Image (cartoon, rainbow, N blue to C red):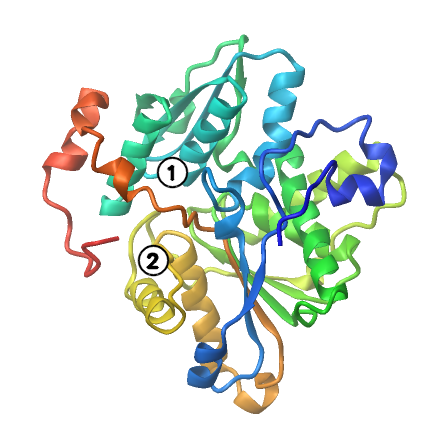
Amino acid sequence: MPENRKKPLLFEKYPDLEANIPWIKLAPLRTPVKKLTILEKKLGINSLWVKCDNLTSPLYGGNKVRKLEFLLAEAKDKGYKKVITAGGLGSNHCVATATFCNQLKLKPSAVLINQPITNYVRNNLLLDLYFKNEIFYTDEYDKIPRDPDVYYMVPGGSTPLGNLGFVNAALELKNQINNGELPEPDYLFVASGSSGTAAGLLLGIKIAELETKLHAIQTSFAPYSSFNAVRRLAKKTWKLLAKYQNSIPKASIEQLNFNEDYFGGEYGLPTKEAIDAVKLIKETEDITLETTYTGKTFAALLGFVQTKKKKKIKDKTILFWNTYNSRDFSDILTKLDYHDLPQEIHWVFENPLPDFGLEKN
């Protein structure tokens, strides 16, 4: 059930943080957890769960709003009127940033670079149009325009400040465990693109005194998505908190497993494992994923279950953190015209889609 939050759980646990760290409420968190009973039977395990961050906000779901509650608060506090960030052509982060910039009357803009084209990418570009995102199309992130009057947000929002959204999310999970909504997970699977979500969770589960092993799944290029990136960002996030609260524990690297086996070699490239995982969870539990992040992460979870001896993990609790937006924009998308996007990206809609075996994703 959503909560009427006045402040993050992180501020409740450490009151000294509130006066020093910017935050603004953008979403009716907390998100529910759900037991995947049909898949449990199919896989031969007894405790498989999903954390439904696809339901973070009715405006645009997914994991990004947790970071944006801190990042956009900083932009507002410092008096910025415009925000610029970056991502692939189908970036969820860029769409989410535009969505919540609109809510705060900030002007959004996004620098977009190439990735394999699917309908999912096309739809997100149309959503950029819908949410009035000013688009710059380029081939490298280092060509992002710099302006001292613009708030610059790194791709994915993965800064120490943004990562606090997932430190807070781990405390949210701890409350749900304490309330009896799910057992404490033995294993938690989450996508790692720019590594901030995983870094925040890694630090957060330590602060929450959970023994959970975090499985961060590579979904983008190294060094942005890597064991070292998660470790480094977790350390930087801890340093930010430690400036104002000296009792905060450091993240435990022993709780981190970083899996590179499901990336597929190219950002946004649909792999067979991801396609199969997306189909399986849709057919069994009616949960919609995509093949860039969540499909690869769920494929890694399935691989983990299938390669472990069932006796060892049959009664272990496994949690899949769904970071995908599930708001249905189909009615809106039919009313949008790609010709209103910058001409240099019209080819995304005019060239035939590559055959990845998932024409509708």
Q: Is mark 2 on a helix, strand or loop?
A: loop
Query: Residue at point 46% right, 37% down?
Result: 59
Above or below: residue 326 compared with residue 182:
above
Query: Residue at point 73% right, 59% down?
Result: 174
Q: In which quarter of the image is the N terminus?
A: bottom right
Above or below: residue 220 compared with residue 284:
above
- What label sits on residue 91 in the rendered view? 1
- Mark 2 vs mark 1, foreground winner is 1
Dot 2 crowding, Cα within 10 Å, few <14, some 14–19, many 20+: some
Residue 312 visible: yes
Q: Where is residue 64 in the image (x, y as percent from the top left)?
A: 52, 40
Q: What element carries label 1?
A: loop
From the viewer's perspective, is 326 left or right of 80?
left
- What label sits on residue 269 in the rendered view? none
Identity, as a three-letter code, of the amino acid under mark 2: Gly
Q: Where is residue 317 in the image (x, y as percent from the top left)?
A: 62, 75
From the viewer's perspective, is 242 left or right of 343?
right
Q: Where is residue 54 in the image (x, y as percent from the top left)?
A: 48, 51
In this rendering, the count of numbered labels is 2
Query: Residue at point 40% right, 33% down?
Result: 95
Residue indicated by mark 2: 264
User: Which residue is at the far bottom?
Assistant: 311
Query: Residue at point 36% right, 67% down?
Result: 277
Q: Position of residue 44 (x, y in %)?
A: 48, 87
